Image (cartoon, coloured by chain):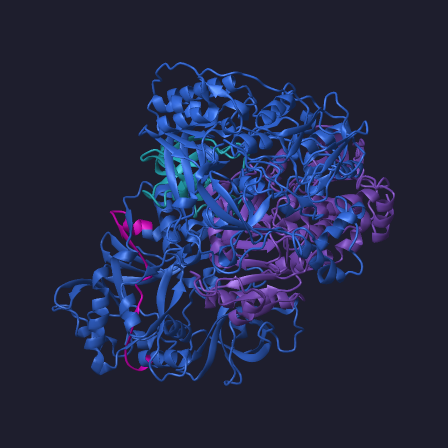
Amino acid sequence: MIIDHPLLGPRDSDEFTYLGDASLLDRPDGLGEDAAARFAEYVYMRDNPAGLHRELWFHAAGDLSWLVVTRNTATHEITAVELASDVTRARRAGK
Amino acid sequence: MGRFSALRLLREGLTGNRGWTPHWRDAAPQPAYDIVVIGGGGHGLATAYQLAATYGQKRVALLEKGWIGGGNVGRNTTIVRANYLLPSNQGFYALSLRLWERMEQDLNYNVMMSQRGVLNLCHSDAQRDAAIRRGNTIRLSGEGAVYLDAKALKKDWPFLDYDNARFPIRGGLLQPRAGTARHDAVAWGYARAASDLGVDIIQNCEVTGFDIRGGKIFGVETTRGAIAAGKVGVAVAGNTSRLMQMAGLRMPIESHVLQAFVTEGLKPVIPGVVTFGVGHFYISQSDKGGLVFGGDLDGYNSYAQRGNLPMVEHVAAAGVSMMPMIARARLLRSWGGIMDMTMDGSPIIDRTPVEGLYLNGGWCYGGFKATPGSGLVFAHLLATDTPHEAATGFRLDRFARGHVIDETGHGPTPNLQ
Amino acid sequence: MSGAFRLPGGLVDRDRPLGFTFNGRRYRGFAGDTLASALLANGVRLVGRSFKYHRPRGIFTAGSEEPNALVTLGMGRNALPNSRATMVELADGIAAFSQNHLGPLGFDPLAVTDLLASFLGAGFYYKTFMWPKAFWERLYEPLIRKAAGLGRLPAGADPTLYDKGHLHCDVLVIGAGPAGLAAARAAGQAGARVILADEGFRPGGRLLAERHEIDGARGADWAAAQWQALAAMPNVRLMPRSTAFGLYDHGITGVLEQVAPDARAADKPAEILWRVHTRRIVLAAGATERPLVFPGNDRPGIMLAGAVQAYVNRWAVAPGRRVAILANHDGGAALAAELEASGLDIAAVIDARRDPAVVATRGRRGLRALTLADGRRIACDALAVSGGWSPNLHLAVHRDGKPLWRDDIQAFVPGEVLPEGLAVAGAAGGSFGLRDCLAEGGGAGRAAAEACGFTVPDAPGFAADNAQHPPAPIWELSPGRGRAWVDLQNDVTTKDIRLAHREGFRSVEHLKRYTTLGMATDQGKTGNMLALALMAGHTGRSIPETGTTRYRPPYVPISLGALAGREGGHGFKPVRRSPTHDWAAARGASFVESGLWLRAEWFARAGESGWRASVDREVIAVRAGVGICDVSTLGKIDIQGRDATEFVDFVYCNGFAKLPVGRVRYVLMLREDGIVMDDGTTARLGENHYLMTTTTANAGPVFQHLEFVRQCLRPELDVHLVADTDGWAQIAVAGPKARTLLARLVDAPFDISDAAFPFMACATLTVCGGTPARLFRISFSGELGYELAVPAPFGAALAEVLMAAGADLGVTPYGVEALNVLRIEKGHVSGPELNGQTAPKHLGLGRMASQGKDYIGRALAGQTRIDGAETARLVGLRPTDRTQPLSAGAHLLEPAAPRTQTHDLGWISSVAFSPTLGHHIGLALLNDGEARIGARLCAVDAIGDTEVEVEIVPPQFIDPEGARQRG
């Protein structure tokens, strides 16, 4: 696969390692009241859609960016690639 | 339908092979069943068979969206073993291995269960120690395992690279009673036996929704109409999340693609199954002579049933590194299956929060060897509403409870398991 | 033997005769021949045996779809089994051997299976061999396995070199037939970067086999001229002998290149695997002819009509003296005229649409005659068969999509929705007229170049005829009149298809799996379509309703060696060596793999009886004096920024806010599920500067994790990370005399006294007169210990200096084995305990976790359990009888308990012989471990066949109060 890195342009997916669902960006508060239950959900449960999937890739053999890639799990087509740090900042700003 | 036997083969051969009949009835759906099993793969078929054979269920239907055996039971590397590290897994797989050993007699179908041994190579002292820990778990479960050092290995496995390997072969854990089986025959054998016992095997019948009212299931909607059911068992490897989403349930599962490969036919050269300890590579030779092998997941979520070239190359490199002679073998076919990868690498066989809806899934890339055991314990759960004693660990809520069954220690990152 | 069947003309170079052998007999051919054409030229018709019934078989095709003519090339380690004679470019000295027979090729006793065929139909093995149970592995299976298989894999390492590479292009054109050449020409002229790949060694595709003219020139000459013109374009790369075997995601195409025989050398690769990155692809892979099904259709001498045509026209070889032709279209008559013009006798032209059908054939080792339904017997030694052509659409559907059925050509073509960027041209898309092929190719080439942003100059089209011979929907002749083959290699006959239908295996996937149809080395290229049509006939469904099996890579079989490239053998993974590697080797070290690293395991001395003697000596030297050990392989991550403290505090379960500058902390890093990810030490070098060390194995994963936390979870923090493992050489200096030794190296005014530089202190300083260094007072061994780091280039020199400066102290280099003994004696956990299944509490480290802050892993650390060892705690153990050894991996049970899973209490994770204590010791993870201290259990190692009674003790065997390391 080819991942169109927002800073570096198209790169072979061989240069990346994969982590999984971008919901991992939404870490609950570890000191929160129902932390154990919320973390069990955060750590273990996944939507796992057959279709568009926002997911985390790490440019390990590249610039060490974490990316949020929007990819169709049925066709492998990639429709968007963002810097994960941008995504997290934008979510915080939106809250 | 009639039993299979050498005598019958002879008789049919002399009379033009006209007496053979379909191995299973291609049934049409009835309006209602006591139990509906979704998924005509190995596990669904084995479950349907056990419901009828062991638990005396009379009104059982098995629904398959395509043709039976078209999923992972027909696209795997056919390895059968019970060599697990953790007791919740090992106890179950030990049961499964014992069922494999009598499958041909149980089903009157030769699934070519071939107990030629599975060898896991070790390349360091740490791997050897881990192998011994595992070997002792296996022995405590009543199953067999032996550790062979490099010198002993050379006798039966002379073709491994003992001299120039990047990671030297120190020895290996061998399970002599493990081996391989003809994967398609397992599906067909169960289908035939289940059909004989009255199970309706309904092909080209895709489930499109559940009839759930007040937290209880009453049936399924399918491309061939609604079917009422007292209980519904889901055994749809690779698609568990999709099905369970129809019931409003979120799963500790990611779907990943695993590629598998076979070479052109070659004269016998590899005696059993051998796995590489550092490159994640496993290989055996089929009765027809093809080298059947596989490696890691491609590593990203996928429902596409196909993988990409980097993993093909990586798997080949691991294989050639381990046994240089196979460089001259040619890759003939490759395929990709969708794996339900759970967050701890172990399966789920449990009731769900929906009354009457039961789940058998999350087999990761190890479902084939589990087939007979999975069928028995899932049928037990469906018929009795209590977990089978060999599957008490495979609970859906174990993640929330913190009682994971993490064989490899990779944690909740399915693509590394 | 001379080429008795060689005709005049053709595209072989008669000035370059080549000698070769087949089954030991010498023959001659010419440059330009394939092994198959050269064999036919010499009248060799029987070349192999079929897979199941060991039927005599001859050459059936002239291309990569060959099902029959598989040979082993070469001998010994150079033997290459299952080579298709039709694709082997003839070279001087080739030695080829037939396969899959016992005894000579002409008399194979295994052909007895052929006589038993009535009992060995599809799936017969599922119905028998079940009694008695044990006989499957002992008797039946070995017999089957011995009879099965094709060629024999040579033992030992493959002497061939393989290579791989990446290529990038705007337009990849697959196939150098008329469509492909026209496509490449159009795209190339526009200036696009073009790659033209063709599986053959001569461009032209079917133009070489047929007698078409283009622009008034002979097709083969036109192809050569186009090829030349393309070769002159700097933006075009021509790749003959290169098969595009798979289309993968995002336009990446796998291409396997065979190096030309005359360019081969022992030190050069013979095959090159290319990953071709494309923007546009033109699939012009042509089509594959299929035969017709009739009784006895598998004899040597029966050949595809297009292959007969190729042998005559391209290679100037007569496949027989008297040729009969059988076709379900008008091409039969046209071929007859061509062959006659070449001087061949035409025995008959049988039009399957009207003429009496073939009901039988004769000739055990080669065709001698046909019998027709009207009783006529036709003497012939070759039969050209054509049942129409199937487009080579494979790459168009490797990714997604289903082929589409076209009634007019009785074939599947690529579907309407093609993979993004891919276009199909010519016969691959079902266009069989030459003019259409040229026009489609040119059009596809233009469109591809335009899509890449190039302007395409106008160019005139090519003039050619457009004759086509669409086949009638006839697949089988004379059904029920005798055994008729569908899949030649795997011996699938019409009876097998019928049986599959009868037994319910009616979907194509079931049919394939039950009969083994299409699973041979030819991947069903000539047979699958026939079987589909026959099954459709049995079920009454149409062919498109019946459907095809899924097309998957590779398009043709490709060697694993090529896929592995240079990564086989020792090249599987890179080797990492520490800066002191050569120094250690010179000191007698042996090395052990630790991940990708090689680390010194021990430094053997002359006269030592074995590794234990070396390790014992090294351990004692550390405990009694001073030793040095390279620890450069530990991961080092430099962490800086205004928020560095907050960051470090978040990724470790320990508290960090109060750690002063100049101090080190032993740390545990958890995963979010509460399991220990890694341990190590982290030093605060400055107010906003930390240096983290990780274990050797986890350096990469920990860094990735930290970047995840930094970028994904806490992007608001001002903190930056640099992985600096390779930047520094680090040497542990341990033992009661460590300070004495190091005091000789540190530059003034650094004060190394215990008061100024206590346990868990760290500093940046210079050593040896100005060399920058970092010093950490930390101890894995439990002794007074330091780790001294210098820039990596000074690593070996530092080791030398330490050895020289400490000579009078008896300084001793020690390896990782001694390091391991020392840490077990001290009760420190390492890889076997930090195995991804243990939480801090299991390791007795639960108190390290800070209560007052959020950190990765906080929420779940308390509840995560180990399956089977739910209440495990780290303990130490020693054999009650101190002379007995312990084994790692043994499980712990009550001495009287049954040896079963339910009584399993835990396992021994690490063991060592302690030279300090004089007996074996171990660490274990044991249920209720703390409560069992003082108890006696049995260490059961069924694998090693030992049971040893052990005493459970606290994990620290040496200096539990820590006085030594603080000394």
Residue B28 sits in quarter: top right
Q: Residue at x 54, y 24 (%)?
A: C427
Quadrant in which the N terminus of chain B appears: top right
As drawn, C499 above or below C408: below
Q: Residue at x 39, y 28 (%)?
A: C227
Q: Give the x, y percent position of residue B123.
A: 47, 64
Q: Residue at x 66, y 30 (%)?
A: C385
Indicate the chain coloured cyan by its letter. A
Q: Give the x, y percent position of residue C540.
A: 77, 26
C243 or B80: nearer the viewer = C243
Say left or right for C81 vs A20. Answer: right
C781 or C173: nearer the viewer = C173
Q: Give the x, y percent position of residue C645.
A: 29, 51
Give the colour of chain B: purple
Question: Is-magenta flag for residue C631?
Answer: yes
Say left or right for C820 vs C550. Answer: left
Q: Give the x, y percent position of residue A15.
A: 38, 43
C491 or C821: nearer the viewer = C491
Residue C118 sits in quarter: top right
Q: How many marks?
A: 0
Judge whether residue B50 can be spotted in this image: no
Say left or right for C36 vs B93. Answer: left
Indicate the chain coloured blue by its letter. C
Judge whether residue A89 can be spotted in this image: yes
B327 or C489: nearer the viewer = C489
Span shown in magenta: C623-647
Question: Is-magenta flag for residue C960?
Answer: no
